[in-house]
């Protein structure tokens, strides 16, 4: 019935696996929990995660080498044996104790993909982690009604249920560099193949907050990924908001001005975004100006 698939890398997934295992054991359904480790290097974490193998129908497997976020998800799906695949990122934890049951109840005959959503703890983190927390709460932790306004772009791959036969049609692209935005490309392929995404209120908390400096670096890498997608015609120009705005600016040659802003004010952007009061307006301008810089 259900394969729960958890890719991990240098992250202790004991609490997550214990929670979903306890929940599904209460239900009368066939299941497996596959946890594939993408070549972790932290021996203490590896040792803790190996205890997972003591649970019934649960496997923790360490890959010989790091194959990347897209490839490990595809491998998990390929080796899963049940009809429905529940993908969970390593750094999430279900909000409710009926998380698994809620997903199973939401399945209809026509269901293809179901996304439960994401939450962030209300408690403010320390200053070094504020940017990721602020962005997540404002831009990712959306209600079902808000997500339904754009069912594909509001879909994130850290907590979703997909029918295996659908995943056989739409997989994660392993040809792109390991730069970020693989979920954007995955969602576009869902849209391209007319795969329906149902949004429900069944969230997980995102616990793995990166330091602001790390998140900022990853955000720039995500723009590099978008730039690559555009160069290789992997997504349409208007698929994401940032690319849509960029091409409007480029049409009237204003992208040169934004490129100038990036070159001359990058330090000011960094100072604000790494502070205790990061501005999402500046965060958006930073990323947009960097995309313009790449095309100038």
Image (cartoon, rainbow, N blue to C red):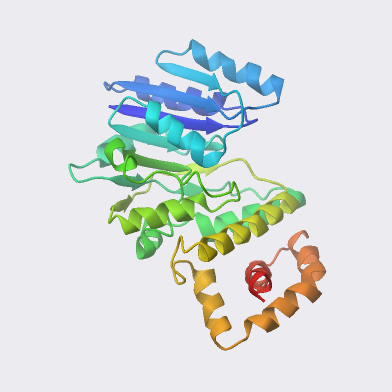
User: In the orientation shown, which residue stands out farthest toward the left?
Assistant: 109
Residue 122: x, y in percent?
Answer: 59, 49
Q: Quadrant of residue 67?
A: top right
Residue 23: x, y in percent?
Answer: 39, 25
Which one is nearer the viewer's eye here, 282 or 127? 282
Which one is nearer the viewer's eye here, 87 or 125? 87
Residue 98 visible, this angle: no
Residue 39 visible, this angle: yes
From the viewer's perspective, is 31 left or right of 286? Answer: left
Residue 245: x, y in percent?
Answer: 53, 76
User: In the orientation shown, which residue stands out farthest toward the bottom?
Assistant: 252
Q: Quadrant of residue 267?
A: bottom right
From the viewer's perspective, is 130 left or right of 67? Answer: right
Which one is nearer the viewer's eye here, 167 or 206? 167
In the rendered image of this protein, does residue 224 appear above or below residue 40?
A: below
In the rendered image of this protein, does residue 54 appear above or below residue 99?
A: above
> What residue sits 47% from the left and 36% below the top?
73
Across the whole image, how many numbered discs are drawn on residues? 0
Q: Quadrant of the N terminus?
A: top left
> What residue sits 50% from the left and 41% below the top?
70
> What residue sits 43% from the left and 27% below the top?
20
> What residue sits 29% from the left and 42% below the top?
166
Residue 19: x, y in percent?
Answer: 47, 26
Q: Quadrant of the C terminus?
A: bottom right
């Amino acid at each position: 019935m259900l394969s729960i698939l958890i890719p991990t890398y240098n992250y202790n997934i004991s609490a997550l696996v214990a929670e979903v295992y306890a929940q599904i054991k209460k239900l009368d359904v066939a299941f497996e929990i596959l946890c594939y480790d993408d070549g972790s290097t932290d021996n203490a974490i590896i040792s803790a995660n190996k205890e997972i193998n003591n649970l019934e129908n649960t496997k923790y497997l360490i890959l010989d080498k790091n194959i990347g976020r897209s490839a490990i998800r595809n491998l998990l799906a390929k080796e899963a044996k049940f009809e429905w695949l529940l993908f969970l990122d390593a750094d999430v934890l279900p909000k409710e104790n009926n998380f698994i049951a809620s997903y199973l109840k939401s399945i209809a005959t026509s269901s293809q993909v179901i996304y439960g959503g994401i939450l962030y703890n209300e408690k403010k983190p320390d200053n070094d982690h504020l940017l990721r927390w602020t962005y997540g709460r404002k831009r990712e932790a959306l209600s079902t009604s808000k997500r339904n306004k754009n069912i594909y772009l509001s879909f994130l791959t850290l907590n979703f249920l997909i029918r295996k036969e659908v995943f056989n049609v739409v997989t994660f692209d392993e040809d792109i560099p390991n730069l970020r935005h693989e979920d954007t490309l995955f969602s576009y392929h869902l849209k391209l193949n007319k795969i329906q995404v149902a949004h429900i209120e069944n969230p997980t908390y995102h616990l793995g907050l990166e330091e602001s400096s790390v998140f900022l670096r990853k955000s720039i890498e995500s723009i590099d990924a978008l730039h690559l997608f555009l160069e290789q015609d992997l997504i349409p120009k208007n698929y994401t908001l940032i690319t849509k705005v960029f091409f409007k600016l480029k049409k009237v040659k204003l992208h040169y001005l934004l490129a100038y802003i990036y070159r001359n004010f990058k330090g000011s952007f960094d100072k604000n975004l790494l502070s205790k009061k990061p501005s999402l307006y500046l965060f958006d301008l930073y990323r947009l100006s960097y995309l313009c810089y790449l095309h100038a």
